[in-house]
């Protein structure tokens, strides 16, 4: 894994997850799923699952950046890639949490 890839992987994964989850939100709202599963609407359950998958993906990427096999060599690239990994994880949680906290469709 090159240093540039290590630095950019988390923000790009956040961008993909953000686009996918909010695109999924629009599709689910247009489908008008009213059935409930485990006391939650199906659309909220699918969005919660997408949120969890996105957070786990970012956590896995961060773990890879801290590993000796995939992490950068000591120096500038290591510090920046790990900071970028933390930024991707926090951005994923911060921007996708509203899918759990607010109403799903207007």
Image (spheres, grey):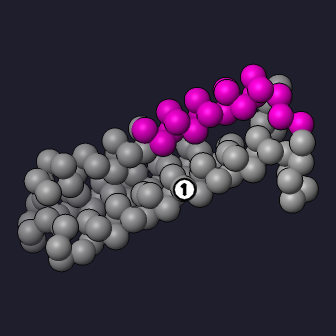
Instruction: Report the front residue among 34 and 103.
Output: 34
Q: Residue at x 56, y 43 (%)?
A: 95
Magenta-colored span = 16-34
Q: In the rendering, at what x and y percent does residue 73 appear?
A: 9, 69
Is 22 a magenta residue? yes
Query: Is residue 69 something one can see in this rendering?
Result: yes
Q: Residue at x 35, y 64 (%)?
A: 62
- Placement of the N terminus among the 4 image quadrants: bottom left
Q: Residue at x 54, y 56 (%)?
A: 53
Residue 91 falls left or right of residue 2: right
Is 9 a magenta residue? no
- Placement of the C terminus among the 4 image quadrants: top right
Q: In the rendering, at what x and y percent does residue 105 appear?
A: 80, 30
Q: Quadrant of residue 25?
A: top right
10 Å neighbourhood of mark 1: few (<14), some, or many (≥20)?
few
Residue 44 falls left or right of residue 56: right
Q: In the rendering, at what x and y percent does residue 84 appear?
A: 30, 54
Instruction: Report the front residue among 105 and 38.
Output: 38
Secondary structure under tag 1 reads helix
Instruction: Identify whether 34 is placed above or below 101.
Output: above
Q: Residue at x 85, y 45 (%)?
A: 41
- To which residue does mark 1 refer? 53
Query: Is residue 100 something one can see in this rendering?
Result: no
Residue 85 falls left or right of residue 38: left
């Amino acid at each position: 894994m090159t240093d540039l890839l290590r630095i950019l992987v988390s923000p790009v994964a956040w961008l993909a997850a953000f686009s996918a989850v909010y695109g999924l939100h629009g599709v689910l709202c247009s489908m008008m799923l009213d059935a409930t599963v485990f006391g939650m609407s199906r659309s909220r359950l699918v969005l919660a699952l997408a949120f969890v998958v996105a957070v786990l993906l970012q956590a896995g990427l961060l773990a890879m950046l801290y590993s000796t096999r995939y992490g950068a060599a000591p120096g500038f690239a290591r510090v920046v890639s790990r900071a970028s990994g933390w930024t991707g994880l926090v951005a994923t949680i911060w921007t996708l949490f509203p899918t759990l906290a607010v109403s799903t469709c207007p």
